[in-house]
Image: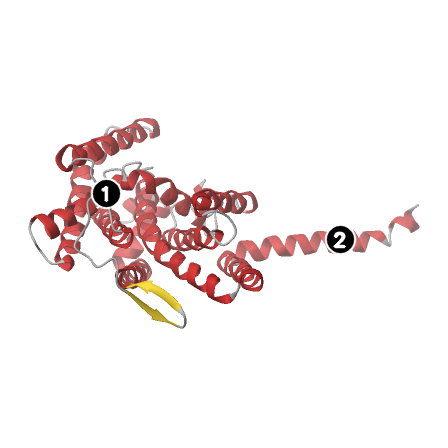
Amino acid sequence: MEAEASPAQPGALGRREGRASLRTTMSANPGLVAAGIVLAIAVALIATQGLQPVAQTGLNGLISGSYFALGAVGLTLVYGTLKLVNFAHGDLLTFGAYTAFVANITLGLPILLAVLAAIVVTAALGVFTERVMWRPMRAKGAGLLQLLLMTLGLAFVIRYAIQFVAGTAPRTLDVDVTSSVGFLGLRIGQTQLVVMLAGFAVLIGVGVMLRSTSLGRQMRALSDNFDLAEVSGIDTDRVVMATWIFAAGLAGLAGVLYTSSIGTMTPNLGFFLLLTLFAAVILGGIGNAYGALAGGVLLGLAQEWSTLLVDARWKLAVGFLVLILVLIVRPQGLFGRKERL
């Protein structure tokens, strides 16, 4: 019996080692594995659907991925630093879009100044909520449930305040949503091209800030261990305020870019986007800003490529299907760590 079993043992051991090697590769290089899977899907779609449709829908996916990623990065920055699940984050996008509307349409300012106003005013709202709500609640030792309910309440307050002042009718910014440019057989709206380039430029800037500046390193230190960062001499109050400025400012920018891309806004704008933003955060790894960036882009591509195979009304469900499949293989998300769960 032993002589018969022994030849099979090396094969079984080899299979176990192969599976362990695959898990190690996915753990060590999740971004590389994800990029390989995306490339494989793109090649399969090109083989079955043709190059031009895949490239066109991929371009559309990058446009939507740019504002998904902007909103998701702000959401995950707050969670990473304060462990606050902010259900009001989507309504910060709405607030930014309507601030731009007031500046651009009501006051007649150029769209660039309206965008800057949206970023500044939304960042100021984020700072205000930190001072009035979140800092006092942390000082009182509020638990997760209390904070969660407060974020839900804040979301409704912002949404219905906007609805009370601006009404429910769709609003538009003074941007050109009809003109388009063509290259390599592809078409993209002029405003959408600006949205995509501006979105990715800001995301690259945020990534450089987090990796290369003192503030970025301190923000990552607070994300890893808030108490340890505080006893090590980091001014945690200053870093928390900076986190809210970046998170809310990025949300305001994302709201304006989204509105500019699709052409209209309503008070429910951020509510409809919120689940997608959470999906991008979870897909990339909760609390990881780089993961949120990757998650937003991947969701944008997945949703738009899916329209080649199913009706466009199902593309949101496809994005969440991708999220489920990734979490089955890697529950902590692409770039997350197990201890974040």
- Residue 200 lies, with reference to residue 12, above or below; the image says below
For this rendering, which residue is in front, 22 or 171? 171
Q: Amino acid under label 2?
A: Leu
Q: Is residue 184 left or right of residue 35?
A: left
Label 2 – label 1 distance at C-alpha: 56 Å
> Is residue 332 visible to the viewer in this orientation of the structure?
no
Image coords of residue 62 (percent x, y)? 38, 59
Circle 2: element type: helix
- Residue 260 lies, with reference to residue 316, above or below; the image says below
Query: In the rendered structure, are the residues bearing label 2 and label 1 in contact, judged by CB atoms less than 8 Å apart?
Result: no
Would you name the residue on which mark 2 appears?
13
- Residue found 33% across the figure and 50% down from its top: 73
The mark closer to the camera, 2 or 1, is 1
Circle 1: element type: helix
- Residue found 12% across the figure and 57% down from its top: 113
Q: Is residue 301 left or right of residue 93?
A: right
For this rendering, which residue is in front, 64 or 338? 64
Q: Residues within 10 Å of mark 1 (few under 14, many from 20)?
A: many
| Quadrant of the image occupied by residue 277 | top left
Q: Amino acid under label 1?
A: Thr
Would you name the residue on which mark 1 appears?
94
- Tell which residue pokes out farthest to the front in this image: 178
Q: Is residue 335 left or right of residue 205?
A: right
Please tell me which of labels 2 and 1 falls first in the chain. Answer: 2
Q: Is residue 196 left or right of residue 329?
A: left
Image coords of residue 175 (percent x, y)? 19, 57
- Tell which residue pokes out farthest to the bottom in this image: 184
| Quadrant of the image occupied by residue 181 | bottom left
Image coords of residue 281 (percent x, y)? 39, 46
Q: Residues within 10 Å of mark 2 (few under 14, many from 20)?
A: few
| Picture disc at residue 167 | none
For this rendering, which residue is in front, 3 or 127? 127
